[in-house]
Amino acid sequence: MSKIKVDLKERSYDIQVGANNLAELGGIIEKNKWGKDVFIITDPIVNELYGDVLRQGLKNLKHCTIEVPRGERNKCLRSAASLYTKLVTHSAHRDSLIVALGGGVIGDLAGFVAATYMRGVDYLQVPTTLLAQVDAAIGGKTGVNHPRCKNMIGAFYQPKLVFSDVQTLTTLPAREICTGLAEVVKYGVIEDADFFKFLEANSKHLNTKAFASPDTLRASLKVWQIIVTESAKIKARVVKEDEREGGLRMILNFGHTIGHTLESLTQYEAYNHGEAVAIGMVAAAKIANRTTNFSAESVARLVELLEKLGLPTKVDGLPIRKVLKALEVDKKVIAGKLKFVLPEKIGKVVIKDDLSLTEIKLALKEIGCK
Ligand SMILES: NC(=O)c1ccc[n+]([C@@H]2O[C@H](COP(=O)([O-])OP(=O)(O)OC[C@H]3O[C@@H](n4cnc5c(N)ncnc54)[C@H](O)[C@@H]3O)[C@@H](O)[C@H]2O)c1
């Protein structure tokens, strides 16, 4: 088990990463006296897979499980309201503890409910997707979607603990693994060249086939533990410097500017988040090759790694005009409007807001836009 501290003064907490450790969480809750009664918020799929293991460890504590239907569209105020009602019905109070067991949707929603129920109750993040273990569960960004805008309503509210069991990754569909891997590659590019090399060297372990036999499973769980730990360290470091996203935290948006646009232009259907971010990172790398001296060899390494991990690096003929419109890039004015996180070398990025339209257009062409 590895432990990383998210250092935020009185709001500091640990991230614990282990394999097959879910049943130990109850003991940790008891030891820390975190809640007289525990409310597990989860979805039916995760509850079916991991609810019992978690509850085994909670034998000495009063606990109750509340399910929310799975999926992004349930990360909404209606779900939050229904959770408040259930918490009131079960007499949850200021000393209760909420445990968010699931992917980023559950983490964001349960975290938001924890931030607002009775003006804030303690909560733990128990992420069960790769994306949530390396990203969503860390940093205290909680919230729900507004019908017209994603993640529009929310609060910065830090958990007491992030508790990751990499064994839970073994039941994830291949595409969910891939979407998390895009964020993992992002960490290598923005902060840590050695970590990027580690990913290149271990890419064969990073797919669902590695879970098939006991030997490959053992080897891959060791690699996953390193990956979740190292990613968590990078995210924790960035969050420590910039808890409320005033500056440095922006580097986490590497690949996301164009990535978000691709997601929304294709109605969130053609690409999931990680796939769109993967293509967005390639576009940013190509822009960087012309503007920050990011070497052609580094661009090629990035593309090769993403492809090895099963992520797309190109789009299929999306019109450049539409992408630019969605990026809100005006023909003349770009400066000060659109900020791009661009690598200078693997492990180091800069933020640029003075790109020319030509530079963006060329990169869009190179990723397959027409
Ligand atoms: N708060 C943040 O800083 C932050 C950062 C990034 C993303 N997010 C949010 O995270 C959300 C996406 O999270 P996600 O990618 O984890 O998706 P998700 O939470 O929708 O989970 C994906 C699917 O996997 C299932 N699942 C979860 N764990 C499983 C397991 N171990 N085995 C099998 N199935 C499992 C879930 O039931 C769900 O159907 C988005 O809403 C996004 O906005 C938040």
Image (cartoon, grey):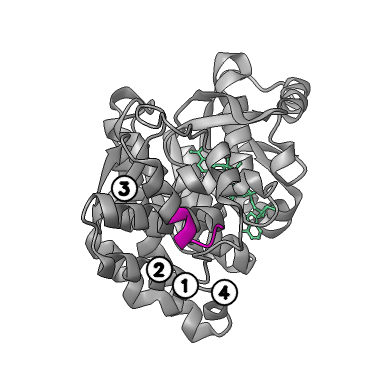
Task: Give left or right: position of 349 versus 271.
Answer: left
Contact between labelled residues 2 and 1, with CB atoms less than 8 Å apart: yes
Q: Nearer the viewer, mark 1 or mark 3?
A: 3
**Pointer 3: what residue?**
342
Mark 1 neighbour density, 10 Å: few (under 14) some (14–19) many (20 or more) = few
Q: Position of residue 129 (x, y in %)?
A: 56, 55
- Say which residue appears at 74% left-offset and 46% top-offset: 70
C-alpha span from label 1 to label 2 = 6 Å
C-alpha span from label 2 to label 3 = 15 Å
**Magenta segment, which residues?**
363-370
C-alpha span from label 1 to label 4 = 15 Å
C-alpha span from label 4 to label 2 = 21 Å
Sequence-wise, the earlier of marks 2 and 3 is 2
Q: Amino acid under label 1? A: Glu
**Pointer 2: what residue?**
303
Q: Amino acid under label 3? A: Leu
- Say which residue appears at 57% left-offset and 37% top-offset: 325
Q: Position of residue 116 (x, y in %)?
A: 59, 19
**Pointer 4: what residue?**
208
Disc 4 secondary structure class: helix
Sequence-wise, the earlier of marks 1 and 4 is 4
Closest to the observer: 350 or 228?
350
Task: Give left or right: position of 62 versus 206.
Answer: right
Sequence-wise, the earlier of marks 4 and 2 is 4
Closest to the observer: 199 or 87?
199
